[in-house]
Image (cartoon, helix red, strand yellow):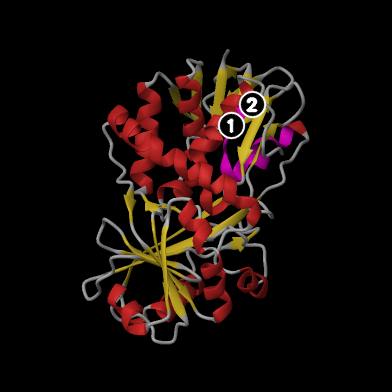
C-alpha cells in the first residue's frame, strides 16, 4: 500500500519506523513548518510526575490540589510510552549512528506544602513497584546534601531515580536517519491542498502525490491541513517557552521539579522549562515567560535568580483538554488518519503512537485514543 505521512516530527517519524519495520511502503512529507517543538524540547521522559501540558487547562488552584503526580487517565499511556523508549534506544543508535544520549538523571521533587508531600508518600509503593526508587525526607540537611543551596523554605522532597532525559535535537536526527536507513522516502515540500475524495495531495512544487493511506502528524497545524474535509480534531495549539542559563557558579547533578523543571544538560547550560499557555498559536519569546520561569526556578534554588539567560526558545505544541492524544481515522473509510495531541509529552509518547497507528492503519485494530 502507498502510505504517505505528513509531518517529520516525533509522531510522523515514529510512525514511519513502525511501518517500515512491518515492511510497509512509506513516504514522509516534511510539511514545511519549523520543527521547533520537538527539536527544542527539554527531552524529559517521566511516566510518574506531571509536566507542562499534563493538565495545563486547569486553574493554578486545581493543579495544586491535584498534586505533583500524573492524573489517573495518563498513567498507563505514560508508562507504556516510557518503556518503549528504553527498549528502542540501542537499536536506533546502532541503526542511525546517531547517539541522542538517553540518560538517567535523578529527580528531586520539591514539595512546598504537606499536601504535595503526602501525595508523594502515599504513592511511594506504587512508584517503586514500577521500577522507580523513591526516597522521601523533610530533613533539610539531608535535602541540601542532594542539592547545595536548595531553598530552606520547602516542606520536603522526594528523590526519584529512574526517569530519563534525552537530547531532543539529536533524537529527531536519529529517528529521521533511522527511517531513511530502513527505506522510508522523505520529501521536503509543503502540502498546499488535500483532495480527500481523489486521495491526492498537491505540493507547493506543483507535484501531485497519490496515496492509499494518508497519516497526518502535523502537530498544531493538523486542523489547518484537514480543513478541506470539513472535519476538525479535538485539539488546540498550546505555547511553551524554555530558557537556558549559564552554569559556571552552580553545581546541579539532579533534575529539580516543582512548578517547573530545572536540569543541567549536556551543553553545560541550565535548562528551565516550560511555560504552558492554552490556545496560543505564537512562537515568539516573551519577557513575561522568562520572568515566570526564573521566579519559579528560584523558589527551589535561589541562586538561579542571578544567572545570565543565554538562550530563550518558544514553540507551539498540539494539546488536548484531557491531556490525552488523539489517534484515529478522520472520516470512516477515507484512508485519512490523524495522530496529534501529545502536548508536552509528544517525545515520550512517540514510539507508542507510531505503533498504534501501524496497528490501526495496517492491522485495522481500533484506536485506544480515538479522535
Image coordinates for residue 227, horizontal then vertical, percent? 72, 37
Position of residue 310 relative to residue 319, above or below, is below
Q: Is residue 64 left or right of residue 161?
A: right
Image coordinates for residue 279, horizontal then vertical, percent? 65, 58
Residue 349 belongs to magenta span: no
Q: Callout 1: few (<14), some (14-19), or many (20+) C-alpha neighbours within 10 Å?
A: many
Q: Which residues are magenta?
A: 215-228
Image coordinates for residue 10, horizontal then vertical, percent? 48, 39
Say which element carries label 1.
helix
Q: Is residue 174 left or right of residue 249?
A: right
Residue at the farthest left position: 248
Residue at x-position 37% and y-position 41%: 171
Q: Tag on residue 356?
A: 1
**Which of 45/218 is in front?**
45
Q: Callout 2: few (<14), some (14-19), or many (20+) C-alpha neighbours within 10 Å?
A: some
What residue is disc 2 on? 360
Q: Are marks 1 and 2 in contact (CB under 8 Å)?
A: yes
Residue 164: in sight, yes or no? Answer: yes
Amino acid at each position: 500500500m502507498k502510505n504517505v505521512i505528513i509531518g517529520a516530527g516525533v509522531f510522523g517519524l515514529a510512525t514511519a519506523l513502525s511501518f517500515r519495520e512491518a515492511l510497509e511502503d512509506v513516504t514522509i512529507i516534511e510539511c514545511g513548518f519549523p520543527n521547533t517543538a520537538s527539536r527544542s524540547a527539554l527531552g524529559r521522559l517521566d511516566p510518574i510526575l506531571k509536566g507542562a501540558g499534563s493538565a495545563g487547562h486547569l486553574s493554578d488552584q486545581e493543579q495544586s490540589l491535584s498534586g505533583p503526580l500524573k492524573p489517573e487517565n495518563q498513567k498507563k499511556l505514560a508508562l507504556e510510552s516510557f518503556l518503549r523508549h528504553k527498549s528502542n534506544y540501542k537499536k536506533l543508535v546502532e541503526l542511525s549512528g546517531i547517539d541522542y544520549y538517553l540518560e538517567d538523571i535523578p529527580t528531586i521533587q520539591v514539595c512546598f506544602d504537606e499536601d504535595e508531600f503526602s501525595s508523594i508518600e502515599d504513592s511511594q509503593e506504587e512508584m517503586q513497584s514500577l521500577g522507580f526508587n523513591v526516597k522521601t525526607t523533610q530533613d533539610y540537611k539531608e535535602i541540601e546534601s542532594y542539592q547545595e543551596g536548595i531553598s530552606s523554605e520547602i516542606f520536603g522532597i522526594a528523590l526519584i531515580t529512574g526517569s530519563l532525559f534525552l537530547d531532543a535535537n539529536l533524537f529527531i536526527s536519529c529517528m529521521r536517519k533511522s527511517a531513511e536507513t530502513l527505506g522510508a522516502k522523505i520529501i521536503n515540500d509543503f502540502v498546499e491542498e488535500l483532495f480527500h475524495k481523489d486521495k491526492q495531495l498537491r505540493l507547493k512544487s506543483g507535484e501531485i502525490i497519490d496515496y492509499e493511506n494518508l497519516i497526518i502528524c502535523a502537530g498544531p497545524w493538523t486542523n489547518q491541513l484537514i480543513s478541506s474535509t470539513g472535519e476538525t480534531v479535538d485539539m488546540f495549539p498550546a505555547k511553551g517557552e524554555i530558557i537556558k542559563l549559564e552554569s559556571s557558579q552552580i553545581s546541579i547533578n539532579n533534575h529539580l521539579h516543582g512548578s517547573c523543571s530545572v536540569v543541567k544538560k549536556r551543553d553545560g547550560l541550565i535548562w528551565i522549562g516550560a511555560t504552558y499557555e492554552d490556545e496560543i498559536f505564537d512562537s515568539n519569546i516573551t519577557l513575561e515567560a522568562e520572568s515566570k520561569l526564573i521566579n519559579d526556578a528560584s523558589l527551589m534554588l535561589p541562586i538561579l535568580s542571578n544567572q545570565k539567560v543565554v538562550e530563550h526558545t518558544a514553540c507551539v505544541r498540539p494539546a488536548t483538554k484531557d491531556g490525552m492524544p488523539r489517534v484515529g481515522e478522520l472520516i470512516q473509510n477515507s484512508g485519512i488518519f490523524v495522530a496529534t495531541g501529545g502536548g508536552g509529552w509528544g517525545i515520550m509518547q512517540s514510539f507508542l503512537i507510531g505503533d498504534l497507528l501501524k496497528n490501526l492503519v495496517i492491522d485495522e485494530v481500533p484506536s485506544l485514543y480515538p479522535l
